[in-house]
Amino acid sequence: MEEIFKKYPLLKDQNVPRETLIEFELFISMLQQGNDEINIISKETAKNEVIRERHIIDSAQIIEFVDLNSNIITDIGSGGGMPGIITVSYTHLTLPTIYSV
């Protein structure tokens, strides 16, 4: 198994492409960089492993409840962009996210 798949063992049954997992790693870097400037996620959860487990994998688990025959779904209350960003990254869906500032 490639190294990238080892980082996301809970997503192996969801057929997430290798390229998407690589994009998740880029998203982690962007999230950490943005978090230094503004508080997107808690400082305690801003470590790579914790972001993977608590934010990305948790967010990806909602896919089983999403109607993939639909063209659009909406993420209301999308703090930090999750789960919307994670869900749309490996589906064909258009996903507007709505959150307060």
Image (tube, rainbow, N blue to C red):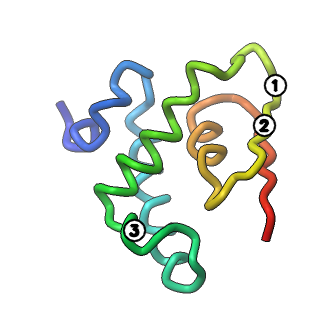
Left or right: 65, with 20 as reference point: right
Q: Position of residue 17 (x, y in %)?
A: 43, 31
Left or right: 77, with 23 as reference point: right
User: Please, what is the three-letter code of the amino acid marked with disc 1?
Assistant: Asn
Cα distance, mark 1 to mark 2?
Answer: 6 Å
Q: Earlier in the sequence, mark 1 or mark 3?
A: 3
Left or right: 94, with 3 as reference point: right
Q: Are marks 1 and 2 in contact (CB under 8 Å)?
A: yes
**In the image, farthest residue toward the top:** 69
User: Please, what is the three-letter code of the amino acid marked with disc 3?
Assistant: Ala
Q: Earlier in the sequence, mark 2 or mark 3?
A: 3
Residue at image point 48% right, 77% down? 33
User: Please, what is the three-letter code of the amino acid marked with disc 2?
Assistant: Thr
Q: Which residue is mark 1?
A: 71
Neighbour tally class for label 3: few under 14, some 14-19, many 20 plus, Cα within 10 Å: many
Whether 28 is drawn above or below 82: the answer is below
Q: Which residue is mark 3?
A: 46
Q: Which residue is mark 2?
A: 94
Residue at image point 58% right, 70% down? 40
